[in-house]
Structure formats: C-alpha cells, structure tokens
Image (cartoon, helix red, strand yellow):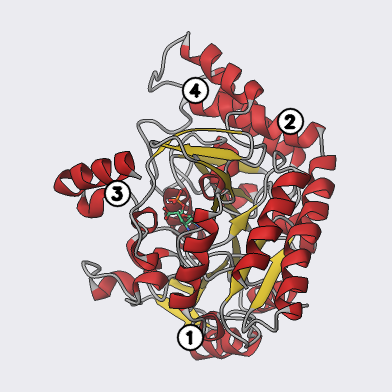
Amino acid sequence: MTRSQELFQRAVNYIPGGVNSPVRAYGAIGETPRFIQGAVGSRIFDADGNSYIDFIDSWGPMILGHNNEAVKESVIKACENGLSFGCATEVEVDMAEFICEHIPTIEMIRMVNSGTEAVMSAIRAARGYTGKNKIIKFAGCYHGHSDAMLVSAGSGVMASGVPDSAGVPRGCTEDTMLAIYNDLSSVEALMNECRDQVAAVIVEPVGANMGVVPPAEGFLQGLRRLCDEHKALLIFDEVITGFRLAFEGAAGYFHVTPDLTTYGKIIGAGMPVGAYGGRKEIMEMVSPVGPVYQAGTLSGNPVAMAAGLTQLKILYEHQEIYTNLRDKGEKLYGGIREILKEKEAPCVINHIGSLGCVFFTREPVTDYASAKTADTKAYAEYFKHMLRSGIHLAPAQFEAMFLSDAHTEEDIQATLEAVRKFF
Ligand SMILES: Cc1ncc(COP(=O)(O)O)c(C=O)c1O
Ligand SMILES: N[C@H](C=O)CCC(=O)O
C-alpha cells in the first residue's frame, strides 16, 4: 500500500479529494484509494504491485476485459494518422452507419465525449422537438452531472448522502420532476399534474446507480404507454446497459422502443466517448440541420471512434458473448445468493445479466427508498474484506458489479470463496 498512500497524499494537495471523479476516492468505505498502474483481462494491478480480480471494469466500458488486443491495435493504428483534426473523418461515418444499421431504435446518432454530455444533449433535443420543458426523472437514477439531472441522483451523489448538489441554481432544476422507480402511478400523477408540459421521461432501463435495480415487469412498457398518451418522449439512458444487456441494449432486451437513447462507456471501449441518437425527425432538430445547438471540439475523435467501433464490431460478430455473460452472471450472482441464504445473511442480491449488486438490507430493493435502507457501513466491511482477498468491487454500496468476457470460471470461484469467508 505504500505507493498508493504516497500518491494519494500527493494528489490531495492538487486535486479536490485527490481524484478526478468522487466515487474513486473510496470515501464511502474509508480506505485509501488504490492507484492503478495497469490491467489485462479480468485483472487490475495497483502501484504497489498487488493484483485484483476487477469487477469495476472502468465502470462498464471494458466488456471484453482490460487491454483487449484488437482494441489496442486499432488505437495505435489510428494514432499514427494524428490524434485530432477538428474536422470530419471517415471513421465517424463508419461508426454512425454501423450503429444505425444494427440498432433498430437508432436512425441517426451524434457523438459526444461523455455520458453526461449525451444526456444533457438528448434532453435539449427533446425539449427542442416537443416545445415543452418539463422532464421526469427517477429518484436514484444517475444521468451524469449536468445541472438539471442532479436531483436525487444515484451513484456518488447517493453515497455522499446529499441528494442535490450545491452550485446548481433552482432555475436549472425547477423543470425536473421526480418519480419513483418501478412505480408507474408516480409517473402518471406527474403527467396529469403537468398536462401538456412534459417533454420527456428519462430512465435508466435497469437502475444501476442505486445499486442494481431491474425494472419490474411492465414498468418500461408502461412508461412507453404513458409517454405516448401525453405526447412526451421516452429517453432510455443506456450509458450502462447499451451493448451490455444485449447488443441492442435494454431496448432490445425488453422489447421497448425509446424515442431517444444515450450511450457512453462501451461505445468508447475505454476512451472518453458518449452518444445520443434515435428517431430521425428528432435528431434533425440538432444543429447544423435544426435549431438545437450542440457541439464539441473533440466530438467524434478519430482515436476514440477507432477504439469504440472495434469493440462494437467484436460484440456484434460474437453475440455468444452475451449468452456467456448471462451464464457467468447466473454462476456468480446465483452463487452469492446461495451463500447469503445458507449463512442467513441480512442481505439481498439483485442481478440481471452481467450486472449485479449485494445490498446489506433484508428488504427487497426496487427503488431509491428501499436501496437507502442498506447498511453502508456493513458494505464497507464487505468491500475491505474482498479487497484484501484480491477482489476489486465498487467502493460504494450504490454501484454495480460488472462482469466482462474476460472473467474466468476460476475468477468466479475465487470470488465466491471470498464471499463465503466474509459471511
Ligand atoms: C446511466 C448513466 N448515465 C450517465 C452517466 C454519465 O456518464 P459519464 O460519467 O461518462 O459522464 C453514467 C455514469 O457515469 C451512467 O451510469
Ligand atoms: N456510477 C458511475 C458510473 O456509472 C461511477 C463512475 C464515476 O462517476 O466515476
């Protein structure tokens, strides 16, 4: 731990909290963050030479495992031509065409640099298209850190115990309305209260930033129906679920068609990329075709596009990866469920496909309020035990575990063994 401690001590002098994104400060579990030097496959290595089985996977992008050879080669090749031009490039067309041809809900797409930007831009497009202002989001869903979305947000905001960020003027959030995840009546009530004013409902089709909270049967279909009834757009924030739950994301997995979709993470294969897309008539509202302004100096960066497109092509051509991920999910999360039962642990586990999460509560977790019943101190003890056993989990209760194609049977057995020892 010496080197990680030294680096952290240096970092706090120059970077707020010593990190460039709050969750990785390990604040929620009271540990020194591990500084990472490299990673390959399912393993990640810290600056002191410790090796861990990694279930963060850079928060989702590394679905093929760390440092995938084909992705790395595509990056090196792209770099040889130059890093950025601020002009249109062929690889951007390749990327957009590939997605539009293979994802039925996307007719047009715009690349940006992060999930935050993707959501911010999709909301602007929805407002521009509908001519309405109000947005319904769900407590516990995280959609990045744009002002309008920092209302009862999940992820690091939830772990910090402060539901709304300072520095966000009331004017920026007064059109953001909060509904309860998995509760259609809460959405219907807001729609009726603000008749003809709701531009869009934005949802994580699988909640993955209040821990993992799958949608109840009919929830997403119900949102589609309510949006149609009230002429509001349905935005699926697929920054986590896109190209993860299935190649066609949650929209394909649950057979629900959103009007707009936001992407991040997997679409960039570890490079800083986001995207938003959907119906052509909505996307044609975006500048320079339409009046909704959105731009980016590095948007569609050729190196990032090369990495992302390589990863997407591998996923498309090897869709058995999704079956394998589901099988691994059953083994890992199903195995944990058995252990919890056997040990009569005061915990529940939620999982869907490659995403999973142990909640330190006895209550079924279906929304923000039930997720908040989790004992975060107990999670911290669990995290520390797992870390010392060589298993790298999310350093906060309200985050997901991510399985990748690189996780092996041995990784899963070693993880189950460590879980068993803890309980
Ligand atoms: C569902 C969801 N939407 C949006 C974001 C924001 O993405 P980014 O961190 O790339 O800005 C995240 C993750 O951070 C996310 O999980
Ligand atoms: N929950 C977040 C992403 O999905 C965690 C990543 C971050 O904010 O650093």
Mark 3: few/some/many CA within 10 Å (<14, 14-19, 20+): some
Which is more foreground, mark 4 or mark 3?
Answer: 3
Query: To which quarter of the image does residue 319 belong?
Result: top right
Q: Is residue 294 visible?
A: yes
Residue 164 in the image: state x and y as whole percent: 32, 74
Residue 191 as seen in the image, left or right of residue 162: right
- Callout 4–callout 3 Cβ contact below 8 Å: no
Q: Which residue is mark 1?
A: 194
Kindly identify the amino acid type of the residue bearing the numbered disc 1.
Cys
Specify which label sits upstream in the sequence, 2 or 1: 1
Say whether residue 206 is visible: no
Q: Is residue 332 above or below residue 35?
A: below
What is the x, y in percent for residue 192?
A: 55, 89
Q: CA distance from mark 4 to mark 2?
A: 17 Å
State left or right for residue 141 relative to residue 146: right
Left or right of 91 on screen, residue 364: right
Which residue is the site of mark 4? Answer: 303
Identity, as a three-letter code, of the amino acid under mark 2: Ile
> Which residue in the structure is indicated by mark 3?
19
Task: Indicate the secondary structure of the residue bearing disc 1.
Answer: loop
Calculate the distance from the C-alpha at mark 2 to the C-alpha at mark 1: 45 Å
User: Is residue 150 placed above or below 216 in the rendered structure?
Assistant: above
* Residue nearer the viewer, 369 or 339: 339
Residue drawn at point x = 72 percent, y = 52 percent: 412
Q: Distance from label 4 to label 1 (Cα)?
A: 44 Å
Instruction: Give the mark nearer the N terminus: 3 vs 2.
Output: 3
Q: Quadrant of the N terminus?
A: top left
Q: CA distance from mark 3 to mark 2?
A: 32 Å
Q: Which residue is mark 2?
A: 314
- Does label 3 or label 1 sit earlier along the sequence? 3
Task: Say which of marks 4 and 1 sits in front.
Answer: 4
Element under disc 3: loop
